[in-house]
Image: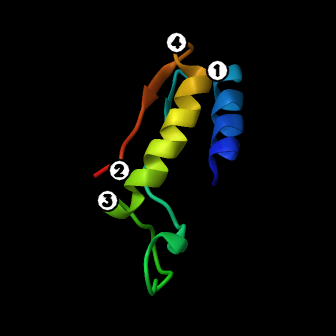
Amino acid sequence: MNSDQAVDLTSLAVEKGADGIIATNTTVDYSLVKNPKEIGGLSGAVLKDKSFEIFDAVAKELYGKTVLISVGRD
């Protein structure tokens, strides 16, 4: 999921009554690692930059409208 998709999805969730958003956790974006095995999700340091990017985009849209939580950022 890219930042625009995350903003669209989380905005819709809040519009539909979500009490908060957990914006990031793991990813299956295997382009973030060299020689991926493409099995399971990725987390930790490899996800840090993408996680910050997505959380920042969501926060710009939803700050003050709901509780925002980011996890999986090593």
Nearest to viewer (mark 1 / mark 3): 3
Q: Residue furthest top?
A: 64
3D distance between C-alphas at marks 1 and 2:
24 Å
| Real-space Cα separation, disc 4 to disc 1, in angstroms | 15 Å
Measured Cα–Cα span from mark 1 to mark 3 = 30 Å
Q: Which percent across, then down, holds residue 44?
A: 31, 59
- Circle 2 Cα neighbour tier, 10 Å, few/some/many (<14 / 14–19 / ≥20): some
Q: CA distance from mark 4 to mark 3?
A: 27 Å
Which residue is painted at 49% across and 38% down in the image? 55
Asked if disc 3 and disc 2 are in contact, CB closer than 8 Å, the reply is yes
Percent from the top left, x then y, of residue 62?
58, 22
Residue 35 in percent (x, y) is at 45, 87
For residue 72, the mark is 2
Task: Look at the picture and state if 27 lies above or below 68.
Answer: below
Q: Which mark is residue 44?
A: 3
Specify the quadrant that holds the N terminus. Answer: bottom right
Q: Earlier in the sequence, mark 4 or mark 3?
A: 3
Name the N-terminal-most of marks 4 and 2: 4
Residue 45 visible to the viewer: yes
Q: Which residue was labeled with disc 1?
A: 17
Query: Which sits earlier in the primary sequence, circle 3 or circle 2?
Result: 3
Task: Mark 4 and mark 1 in contact? Answer it, CB < 8 Å.
Answer: no
Q: Nearer the viewer, residue 38 or 3?
A: 3
Q: Amino acid at mark 1?
A: Gly
